[in-house]
Image (cartoon, rainbow, N blue to C red):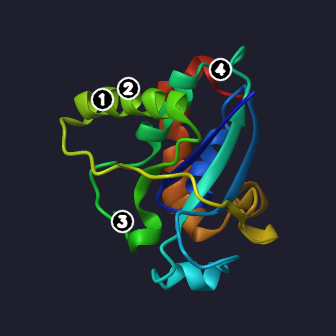
Amino acid sequence: MQTYVLAGGCFWCLDAAYRALNGVVSVESGYVGGSVPSPTYEQVCTGTTGHAEAVRVTFDEEVIPSDVILDAFFTMHDPRQLNRQGNDVGTQYRSAMFPADDAQRETFERAAERAAEWWGGGLVTTMEPLTEWYPAEDYHQDFFAKNPGQGYCLAVAVPKVNKVRARFGEYARS
């Protein structure tokens, strides 16, 4: 098993899109990269804690390659938008990768290079040290599955899930 910590906008969307892929064993929404110990959602939303909304995605490399996990990451958000994704604005919505070691850093850098080609350059995705991980509150975990009719999920998460399913159909859960 391999675990990556990735941030690309609202964690509800990343969580939902990763759960749509075979080989993904678990997804946990949380906060990383900031300076406030044990931040709450309300604190992170102020943009003053330094944390990003992120996911910790654990997957089985024998079922889904790490390149697919990372290419999906760059598919489900626009890595050219600085400190925002659509109407979600603030440093907590930044595009960032948090490698756990040098091997992950190299893998992440190669994925960013591939993504720069698809997106035509201009990526603002940062490579940041993996600091302490703080799980988000329970109601944020698997939010999309628990709230499929919620307006944000319908308007923002569903298109991202569909985009990932379309691009990585051979790995999509049925």
The label on residue 64 is 4
Q: Which residue is mark 2?
A: 110
Q: Earlier in the sequence, mark 1 or mark 4?
A: 4
Residue bearing mark 3: 84
Determine the secondary structure under disc 2.
helix
Kindly identify the amino acid type of the residue bearing the numbered disc 4.
Ile
Query: Looking at the image, is mark 4 or mark 3 earlier in the sequence?
Result: 4
Amino acid type of the residue that numbered disc 3 sits on in the rendered structure: Arg
Q: Residue at x 56, y 30 (%)?
A: 69
Task: Pick the residue in front: 147 or 50.
Answer: 50
CA neighbours of label 4 inside 10 A, class few (<14), some (14 to 19), many (20+): some
Badge nearest the viewer, 1 or 4: 1
**Among the two numbered marks 2 and 3 on one chain, the one whose residue lies closer to the N terminus:** 3
The residue positioned 49% from the left and 40% from the top of the image is: 73
Q: How many marks?
A: 4
The residue that disc 1 covers is 113
Q: Indicate the amino acid at tag 1.
A: Glu
